[in-house]
Image: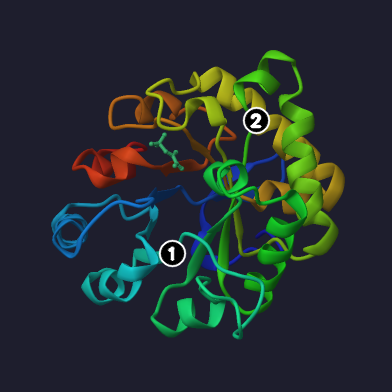
């Protein structure tokens, strides 16, 4: 059987669940978050590399350049396998909101995804769980797909509250969003982002499994089994293949390494 409400584009191969049913696996997904980096020249180089490289055809790829370059990136991408994401979008369609960008504008220039809840938005820009949830609902209702980021700080991990932090961040969105078909979750421990200290594949798997178990409790097992959960935090060309056999790691959200040639190695790390 196929997973109900699961877009065909995100479905790949068959695997069995505990009951022995034949259900379909989650498509590997690699996102590149360029953050506040890049110029026309460097973005051209990155996209041209993706256009010419041999990408694993089974990987869904999404790149998130700064908003000033969204349309430019869209114009350069040649493959249907690669889509473009905004790094943020507001909760209103238009109006007196100086400095914001709207979902409509993101769609208007051909981008199809938006990153929401990144830890840099949560910490530096003080975005609350509720505000991120509102943005998520608005973006989904207007037809954008969402990479929804969650994750704990080092202090929270040391205090043993990783799962409850992730659940709190998810719960705010679960209160508003009923259909999770167009959401990919990125688990990004804050202590691993930009530090060069990636989580071990075992630690990531353990947390991803807890996230999926929580989603199963809230949304049902079938929906939880269909949602992709990415790992983010110092993923690179070398360590990405070491996550290969982790059942609940469905891809990566990549910051620094998405600007470099090794981004292609991460995209191909399941081969
Ligand atoms: C990110 O910003 O989402 C991220 C994972 O960054 P990095 O890969 O550089 O740690």
Q: How many marks?
A: 2
Q: Quadrant of ligand 1?
A: top left
Label at residue 3: none
Residue at position x 55%, y 47% in the image:
118
Query: Is the residue marked by circle 1 packed among few (<14), some (14-19), or many (20+) residues within 10 Å?
Result: many
Q: Is residue 4 above or below residue 169?
A: below
Residue at position x 18%, y 65% in the image:
40
* Of callouts 2 and 1, the N-terminal one: 1
Q: Compare residues 152 and 113 and report the one nearer the observer.
A: 152
Q: Compare residues 146 and 94 and report the one nearer the observer.
A: 94
Q: Is residue 19 visible?
A: no
- Picture quadrant of residue 187: top right
Ligand 1 under 8 Å from disc 2 Cβ = no
- Where does the image place residue 156, in percent across and percent down from the top left? 70, 22
Q: Is residue 28 left or right of residue 6?
A: left
Q: Secondary structure at mark 1?
A: strand
Label at residue 152: 2
Q: Is residue 182 left or right of residue 271?
A: right
Q: Is residue 183 above or below residue 253?
A: below
Name the residue tied to disc 1.
Answer: 85
Q: Secondary structure at mark 2?
A: loop
Q: Is residue 205 left or right of residue 19?
A: left
Q: Where the N terminus falls, by quadrant?
A: bottom right
Query: Is the residue marked by circle 2 packed among few (<14), some (14-19), or many (20+) residues within 10 Å?
Result: many
- Picture quadrant of residue 57: bottom left
Q: Where the C terminus falls, by quadrant?
A: top left
Q: Is residue 44 left or right of residue 257?
A: left
- Where does the image place residue 245, in percent across and percent down from the top left? 48, 27
Mark 2 or 1: the one toward you = 2
Q: Is residue 29 visible?
A: yes
Ligand 1 under 8 Å from disc 1 Cβ = no
């Amino acid at each position: 059987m196929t997973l109900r409400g699961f877009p065909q584009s995100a479905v790949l191969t068959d695997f069995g669940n505990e009951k022995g049913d034949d259900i379909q696996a989650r498509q590997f997904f690699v996102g590149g978050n360029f953050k506040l980096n890049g110029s026309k020249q460097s973005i051209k180089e990155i996209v041209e590399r993706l256009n010419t490289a041999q990408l694993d055809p089974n990987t869904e790829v999404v790149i998130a350049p700064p908003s000033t370059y969204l349309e430019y990136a869209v114009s350069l991408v040649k493959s249907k396998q690669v889509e473009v994401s905004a790094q943020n979008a507001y909760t209103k369609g238009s109006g007196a909101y100086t400095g914001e960008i709207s979902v409509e504008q993101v769609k208007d220039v051909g981008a199809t995804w938006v990153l929401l809840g990144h830890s840099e938005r949560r910490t530096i820009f003080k975005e609350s769980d509720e505000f991120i949830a509102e943005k998520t609902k608005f973006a989904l209702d207007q037809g954008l797909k969402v990479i929804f980021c969650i994750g704990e700080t080092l202090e929270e991990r040391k205090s043993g509250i990783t799962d409850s932090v992730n659940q709190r961040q998810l719960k705010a969105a679960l209160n508003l969003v009923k259909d999770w078909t167009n959401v990919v979750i990125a688990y990004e421990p804050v202590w691993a982002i930009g530090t060069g200290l990636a989580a071990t594949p075992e630690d990531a798997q353990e947390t991803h499994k807890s996230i999926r178990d929580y989603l199963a409790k809230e949304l049902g097992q079938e929906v939880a089994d269909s949602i992709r959960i990415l790992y983010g935090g110092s993923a690179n060309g070398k360590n990405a293949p070491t996550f290969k056999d982790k059942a609940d790691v469905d891809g990566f959200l990549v910051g620094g390494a998405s600007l470099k040639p090794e981004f292609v190695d991460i995209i191909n790390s399941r081969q």
